[in-house]
Image (cartoon, helix red, strand yellow):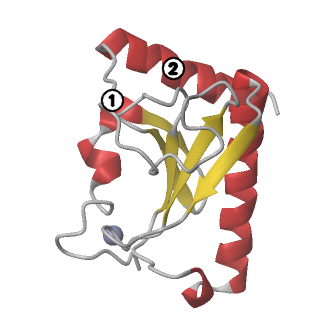
Amino acid sequence: MTITSYNCPMCKRWEDESDLRIAEFEYCYLILNRDQFFPGYCLLFAKQHFTELFQLDKVVRQGMIEELSQVAAALYKLYKPDKINYELLGNMVPHIHWHLIPRFNTEPLWPRPIWSDPHEDLYLTAPEYQNRCDLIRNSLETI
Ligand SMILES: [Zn+2]
């Protein structure tokens, strides 16, 4: 049985943002974040509507962490950042979704969290989104 929540934007995100799809895993979906102010910024979110890590079956939780690690390794290989940031907040959208962000010590915001200062969203063209998704997918396939 699939658990979904009515009115949850994350439950519909795989369908709603099909142009940003990167990969489907066993427990999670991976999409590129629409705002690419931080290049390679991705979202990895649970296929089902879970809100807290401790509520997951151990097998699901471990599987999710493994998928998270694979994505981080792919981003690291592709972007060679100084650090990968992992953020699981859920205050606005409680459905478990990880923010995965390659970070560089040359950024104005470094070493603070990406949320520490507002920035103007950076949107790409459709071919640019496609290209970035392809690069990350290819990197995933070679780790
Ligand atoms: Zn949901």
- Graded by Cα atoms within 10 Å as few (under 14), some (14 to 19) or many (20 or more), the crowding at tag 2 reads some
Residue 41 placement (x, y as % from top left): 52, 37
Q: Is residue 132 left or right of residue 16?
A: right
Residue labelled with disc 1: 19
Q: Which mark is residue 132?
A: 2
**Mark closest to the chain's N terminus, 1 or 2:** 1
Q: How many marks?
A: 2
Which one is closest to the eye, mark 1 or mark 2?
2
Residue 40 placement (x, y as % from top left): 55, 30
Residue at (48% x, 14% y) in the render: 131
Please tell me which residue lies in front, 138 or 51: 51
Q: Which quadrant would residue 135 be assigned to in this image?
A: top right
Residue 45 placement (x, y as % from top left): 48, 58
Please tell me which residue lies in front, 55 or 40: 40
Q: Which quadrant would residue 9 be assigned to in this image?
A: bottom left
Q: Is residue 123 left or right of residue 32?
A: left
Q: Relative to 117, is 64 above or below?
A: below
* C-alpha distance separating marks 1 and 2: 11 Å
Residue extending farthest to the bottom is 55
Q: Secondary structure at mark 2?
A: helix
Mark 1: which amino acid?
A: Asp
**Quarter placement of the C terminus:** top right
Q: Relative to 96, is 19 above or below?
A: above
Residue extending farthest to the right is 143
Mark 2: which amino acid?
A: Arg
**Quarter placement of the N terminus:** bottom left
